[in-house]
Every structure is written in structure tokens, then in C-alpha cells.
Image: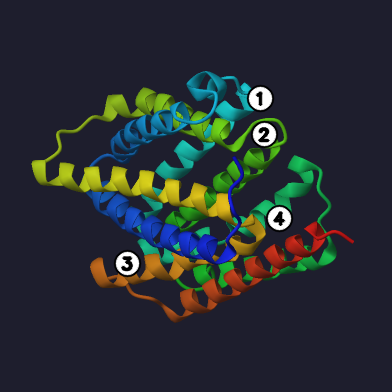
Amino acid sequence: MSVTQDTRLGIWLMIATTMIFAVQDGLSRHLGGTYNVWMVVMVRYWFFAAFVTLLVSRAPGGLRAAVRAQMPKVQMLRGMLLALEICVMVLGFVALGLVESHAVFATYPLLIAALSGPVLGEKVGWRRWLAIGIGFVGVVIILEPGYGVFRVEALIPLAAATMFALYGLLTRYVARRDAALVSFFWTGATGAVVMTAIGIWHWQPMRAGDWGWMALLCCTAALSHWFLIRAYEVAEASAIQPFAYLQLPFAALIGMLVFDEALRVNVAIGAGIVVAAGLFTLWRQRLRAQPG
């Protein structure tokens, strides 16, 4: 069954997705600062895996079709990468806060562009390489390595961005042979298995009130992914992907209003450079994808 294309609806769905992702990050920061990160992400993945299983079971072909991946080893690798990336990013939220973590994490589209050559064999022109270089100048401005003592914690969100970029590239790679719903199922199932193997050894008793926050975290995770799927169903990825950057200001607002974080001038300038460079690479990619 074909889905009617509606770019305006796709944009609004993407904006809603970024808002929910930002709330989700705030919840992760709160719970990760109180409980073991491995356990928090494990419980989140239990709910995510159940949601994915329910979703694919109602799709054409059902669960049996989703399990039959053409590239199961790559699917497992990308699922493991995403699960570990979430853990690393939550550690970044706790160590650095939402504002600075997201400012650095915004480099992931630049990393995707830089790694698309060696991973996917795509050609990266000099304009995109220039944008990548300028973007990482923005990261240097954010991190301020020449002032005071450089904090190792500042590398945590950069590591998370690298892992997420690899996950994104592998997702594009498996898309050549596997349907999107197949990849979605393997993401949830693999992540749940990996996080259970790690997180079960780090279980901590959780207060009744915090189980409410955990339930909200699980619900926002499922809702955001459902919105994201719908956004890509009704609009072209190249048209709505730039709006994913709205997660940065939404998360920064939550960081400042809820967690009393400060927005330093260098972080604002550096983040602006990173986002501008990222938008340029997306624009160049869209131009290259156009026929003629």
C-alpha cells in the first residue's frame, strides 16, 4: 500500500520527533545521574524491543519476515553500536550536561559524510570536505582546548557521535537488501539482548517515583521512533533531515531550564558553526541525489 507524500506533514513530524527526543534525553540525564546507566538503558530497550515486535507483527509478512534479514551479521553490529552509543551519550549527559553534549554530538552528520567514502565507497567532493573541516573547527571552539585543563569527559559525546555515524552508515548499507522494518526489528532485538547481557549485572533497586520517570522514558522512546518512521514514510529524507538539528536547541532549553546548565558563548558559537557545516553537507548531498 502506497503512502501519500506530504512534505509539510513530514516536517511537522520531524519537529515533534526532535522535541520528544530532547525530553527523552532530559529523562535519561535525570535517571542516569541517580542510577546505573547500563540498567537504565537496559530497561528502556526491553520496552523498545516489545514495541518493535508488536509493530512488525502487524506489518505484511509479520514477525517471520522481519527475522529473515539478508545481512544478519551487519544488522547485529549496527544494533549493538546503537545500544552502546546510547549508553555513552547518557554518560555524556551526566558528565557534561545536555547543552555541551548535544553541541558536540551535532557533528555526527559531518562524520557520516567523512566516513561515507571508506565505509560505503561514496565520493566526497572538496566542498563537503571543506565543510567537514570547518565543522570540526566549531568542535574545537566548543571544547576550548587552549584554556585551562582539557576535560577528558568532553570526548564522550564525540565518541557517541562517531558510533552513531557508523550506525547510520551501516543502516544505509543494509538498506540495499533489507526493508526498513526489518532493520528496525533487528535494532530493537539486538539492543535488548546486548543491554540485558550487560545491564543485568548492574541492577539497582529503583524508587517507586522513579519507576514513573522510567515508564515515561520508555513511552517517549517508542513514540519518538514511531513519529520518525511516519516522517520518513510521508516525506523524502533529504527534505526533512535538516529539521533534525532542532533537537540541539530543544535539549539546550531543557538543560538550562530544568538542570540549571549554562550556555557559554564559545559553545553557542561552536555549535552554530557545526550546525551550519552540517546543513551544507546535507544540501550538497541532496544536490548530488537529484537527477541530471
Q: Quadrant of residue 256?
A: bottom left
Q: Earlier in the sequence, mark 2 or mark 3?
A: 2
Residue at 65% across, 38% down: 170
Disc 2 and disc 3: Cα gap in Å? 35 Å
Q: Residues within 10 Å of mark 3 (few under 14, many from 20)?
A: many
Residue 255 image label: 3
What mark, if any, has residue 71 been given in the picture?
A: 1
The numbered disc on residue 174 is 2
Res 2 → quadrant: top right
> Farthest residue toward the bottom?
265
- Give the residue displayed 23% in from the left and 29% down from the top: 203
- Report if residue 244 is visible in the image: no
Identify the element where label 2 is drawn: helix
- Toward the left, the furthest residue is 208
Secondary structure of the residue carrying numbered label 1: loop
Q: Is residue 14 left or right of residue 19?
A: right
Q: Earlier in the sequence, mark 2 or mark 4?
A: 4
Are the residues flagged by discs 1 and 4 in contact, CB closer than 8 Å? no
Image spot of residue 254 (x, y percent): 31, 67
At x 37%, y 62%, the residue is 98
- What amino acid is found at the position of numbered circle 3 in the picture? Gly
Under mark 1, the amino acid is Met
> Residue 67: x percent and y percent?
54, 21
- The label number, if any, that marks residue 113 in the structure image: 4
- Rendered residue at 37%/48% (across/down): 223
Choose between 278 and 291: the one closer to the eye: 291
Query: Looking at numbered disc 2 in the image, what kind of residue is underneath it?
Result: Val
Q: CA distance from mark 1 to mark 3?
A: 39 Å
Task: Answer with mark 1 or mark 4, whichever residue precedes in sequence.
Answer: 1
Mark 3, secondary structure of its residue: helix
